[in-house]
Amino acid sequence: MDHNKTTTAFEIKGYTITRNLGVVRGILVRSRSIFGSIGASFQTLLGGNITILSELCEKTREDAFEIMTKHAESLGGNAIIGIRYESTEIFQGVTEVLCYGTAVIIEAQK
């Protein structure tokens, strides 16, 4: 799916929504490795951005987003509107990241 046809808004400028296909989601549950936890612990001693965890969070969100776009494509969608993220710590060190939105079919306005 073209990422230019995904948005947190409820419309995409220059396009008309011709069909609403419903909610789509990408769910990912990820844990930190022991090495990542140790590395992050050392980074906290220095303060500032904890790059190991930032990179893990970004990769997790990216993967959840990609799962969501594949779900939309499987329904025949060519765009996703109203995209949101949520996360929940299932237990210590294990987090669920949910990316969801509404799959739609859009056509360029004439």
Image (spheres, rainbow, N blue to C red):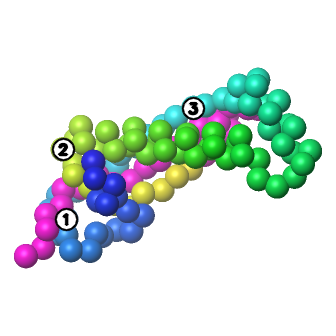
- Can you give x and y, in whole percent of width and height, for residue 37 in the image? 78, 31
* Mark positioned earlier in the residue sequence (2 or 1): 1
Residue where numbered disc 1 is placed? 17
Q: Say which quadrant the C terminus sits in.
A: bottom left
User: Do labels 2 and 1 touch, CB within 8 Å?
Assistant: no
Label 3 amino acid?
A: Val
Label 2 amino acid?
A: Gly
- Is residue 96 highlighted in magenta? yes
Residue where numbered disc 2 is placed? 76
Q: Which residues are magenta?
A: 87-110
Cα separation between marks 3 and 2: 26 Å
| Residue that lies at the very extreme toward the top in this rendered image | 34
Whether residue 16 sits left or right of residue 28 in the image: it is left
Q: Nearer the viewer, residue 51 or 61?
A: 51
Residue where numbered disc 3 is placed? 29
* Mark positioned earlier in the residue sequence (3 or 2): 3
* Mark positioned earlier in the residue sequence (3 or 1): 1
Residue 15 position (above or below residue 23): below
User: Do labels 3 and 2 touch, CB within 8 Å?
Assistant: no
